Image (cartoon, rainbow, N blue to C red):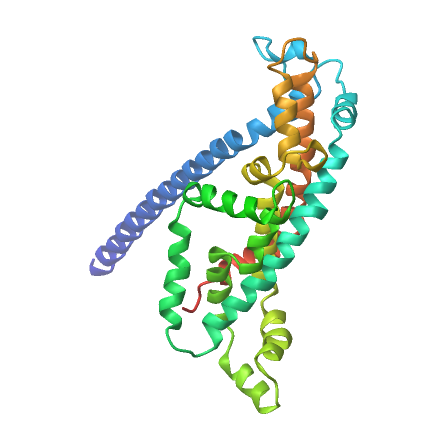
Amino acid sequence: MRVWKSTSARIVTASKSVGKEKVRTLGQATLITFKYAVLLILSVSYVLPLVWMAVSALKVDSQVSTIPPIWIPIPAHWNNFVDAWTSYNFNLYVFNTVFKYAIPATFLTVVSSSLVAYAFSRLRWRSRNFLFAICLMTMMIPSQVTMVPLFITYKHLGWLNTYLPLIAPSFFGDAYFIFLLRQFFLGIPQDLSDAAKIDGCNELAILWRIVLPLSVPALAVVALFRFLWAWNDYFGPLIYLNQESQFTVALGIENLRRTMEQVGSRLMAYPYLMAVSAIVTIPVLIAFFFAQRTFIEGISMTGIKG
């Protein structure tokens, strides 16, 4: 009798635990389903503008404002991409953006920010933390505050209508990138630098041979961010560049957009605008696709030690 009671008690206890486990599993499955549903909705909201841009680039102007919207244009006008790119001289705009602005600014920013970040992270000197705090506080100054004084300064230097106002600030680093690299450099063991000093290396040799090779992910993040900032920069070229032969991609797209508002403008202005925007977006997507692993590693490892 006792054996039967104990056995029945065990069965009841086991059935209750199984029931609780089923409820728990069902709750977890519901939560996971809800999370993925939210992520799916958000991903669609992010991808939808890109899809609309690509689809509109294949239409004629009369199909753009059709209600209900046409998601699959028939026929698809693939020649819009070539016509839009060649009609508005975007080859010159890309050349100006990449070789006259983005590459020099990116190179100088990486070099100058690395030097300043190394001084703030690996060297011991008086008032180091105080000056680093001042460097960080410069990020809180709006660009509108310094716009007029900088314009007057560059005007007196004779730099207007050149790329110098866009490139020269890169000689002095960037506060955000200095902070990013400083946090990454702090995570590199100091023993490596001490061993290099015993072998006779000076600080520049340590930076070049030890710190920078170990900081490739962070340097890649800085280079990618700075290049994309130059690629998308509209305000700077708008202020300092006046000749169309020196325009960047952002100014070229703005000129194309203005043709939509002009009387007697091209009928294909809007599809051309979407076609050029799609082409300009492709290099950004390719850069993130190939540098994704290095980019994520550089961001995740920054700030581990501070």
Q: Give coordinates of residue 32: x percent, y percent.
A: 43, 41
Q: Is residue 199 left or right of residue 126?
A: right
Quarter of the figure with residue 127: bottom left
**Residue at point 70%, 45% (across, down):** 98
Vertical placement of residue 242 versus 157, above or below: above
Q: Give coordinates of residue 8: x percent, y percent.
A: 26, 52
Vertical placement of residue 254 versus 27, above or below: above
Q: Quadrant of the N terminus?
A: bottom left
**Residue at point 42%, 52% (across, down):** 139
**Residue at point 60%, 77% (across, down):** 204
Q: Give coordinates of residue 55: x percent, y percent.
A: 66, 22
Vertical placement of residue 22 versus 124, above or below: above
Check the image and name the residue furthest to the front. Answer: 156
Residue 277 visible? The answer is no
Q: Is residue 220 left or right of residue 82?
A: left
281 or 290: nearer the viewer: 281
Residue 248 visible? The answer is yes
Quarter of the figure with residue 199: bottom right
Vertical placement of residue 164 versus 125, above or below: above
